[in-house]
Amino acid sequence: MTETARQSSKVTQTTHATTTGMVGGGFYDENSAPQWRAIEAVFPLIGNAMATLEVENEGTIRLADFGCSEGHNSIAVMTEALNTLLPRTSRSIQTIHSDLPTNDFSKLFLNLRPVGRSVYGRERVFSCVVAGSMYDQLVPDRSLHLAMTFNAIGFLSRRPLRQLPDYIFPNGPSAARSNGKVSETDRQAFADLAKQDVADFLKVRARELAPGGKLIVQVFGRDSDASTSDGIYDLLNDAVLAFVESGEISREAYASYYQPVYMRSLEELTVPATDPSYAVSDLFKLDQSMSYEVPVPFNEAFQQDSDLTQYAAHYVNFFRAFTEAVLKNALPDSPERDQLVDRVYAKALELLKANPEAYPFRYMAVAMLLTRKV
């Protein structure tokens, strides 16, 4: 690595606390089927990465997933990678599963070692867990051979604005509803941070990856036709506003509360890897990128059985799994806070059952495969 590249790969270590992890106790695992569909769609990228990874050297091959949550999807991804990699080498392999310190690691450990044995069931495969923000360096220099992140980098490294006064999500409401607004100036602040976050993520992964190592970045997103934020955040916004109108949530709390998440287009995901101004293009080669939509399981089930009660329960539990922590922390601490949060999601359930046509949900995603330059 040149001295210029070494300098560009450094990133300031900061505190990242925009969320406190997904809802634990198995709740996220049970309600992340749409995320899994989005991950399955990039299996060709995983296969490509594992089929072209250099395996002739000695030592342990290390595969890392950043943003693993409770591990159900993470373990399935690692299994897919191992199925291609193990026949190609006799080297030992270590899977590394990483998430925020506030993640439910107890559930993750149980998933990794059910009945006291490795879930992978292979003598050459070992696992470990690392707690920390994906925007920081978490493993030693040049120790990784594959780094991955799925449905996680959409959560921003920080809150760029103190308030988002007229809606709870930076991309704004769906065009169909327009049940709120986000100014272009405010939206741009999030767009700029989202691109810088990708650049910072790539810089720390560049330090961790061995030359020739592979990096897969996949996340929910948007295209010119739809955004994954449509529907779910319209519904959550309407539910929260019901308690603002009743006076149980103050206008100040509503203005300060927003989900620190941004829906990127494919260009917004890839430009930090290719634009020299982000100081990353000398570190990685962009091998492949894709924008796509996946079918949503609870949408498919509802189309088949018209069971509105089941549909509404799955829909609300799906977004509750990744929004509850932020909503709870945005409300004043009180003995009634947990109950109020429960009532917000109960209200969302009520609104959805009363008018499901008002909250259509589609799952858009973007992804890219990169190779660490030598």
Image (cartoon, grey):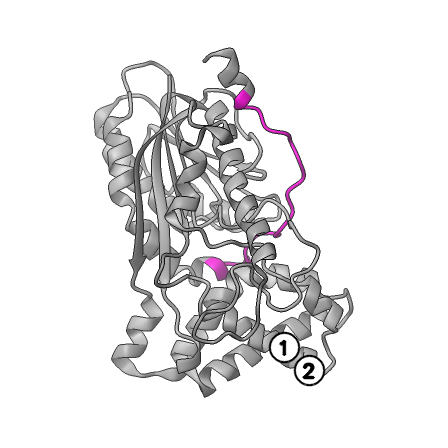
Assess disc 1: are there few (<14), some (14-19) or many (≥20) residues with their C-alpha within 10 Å of its C-alpha: many
Q: Position of residue 136 (x, y in %)?
A: 58, 33
Q: Position of residue 262 (x, y in %)?
A: 51, 53
Q: Which residues are magenta?
A: 8-28
Q: Position of residue 273 (x, y in %)?
A: 42, 33
Give the side of residue 349 with respect to residue 336, left or right. Answer: left
Give the side of residue 124 with respect to residue 237, left or right. Answer: left
Q: Indicate the secondary structure of the residue bearing disc 2.
A: helix
- Please tell me whether the stretch drawn in magenta is mainly helix, strand or loop: loop
* Residue at which label 2 appears: 245
Q: Is residue 11 magenta?
A: yes
Q: Is residue 206 magenta?
A: no
Residue in the picture at 34% in, 50% down: 39
Residue in the picture at 73% in, 78% down: 248
One can see residue 95 in this view:
no
Location of the N terminus by quadrant is top left
Location of the C terminus by quadrant is top left
> Spatial distance from mark 2 to mark 1, Cα to Cα?
6 Å
Residue in the picture at 59% in, 65% down: 168
> Could you say which quadrant of the image residue 94 lies in?
top left
* Residue at which label 1 appears: 241
Looking at the image, do the residues carrying marks 2 and 1 touch, with CB atoms under 8 Å apart?
A: yes
Which mark is drawn over residue 140? none
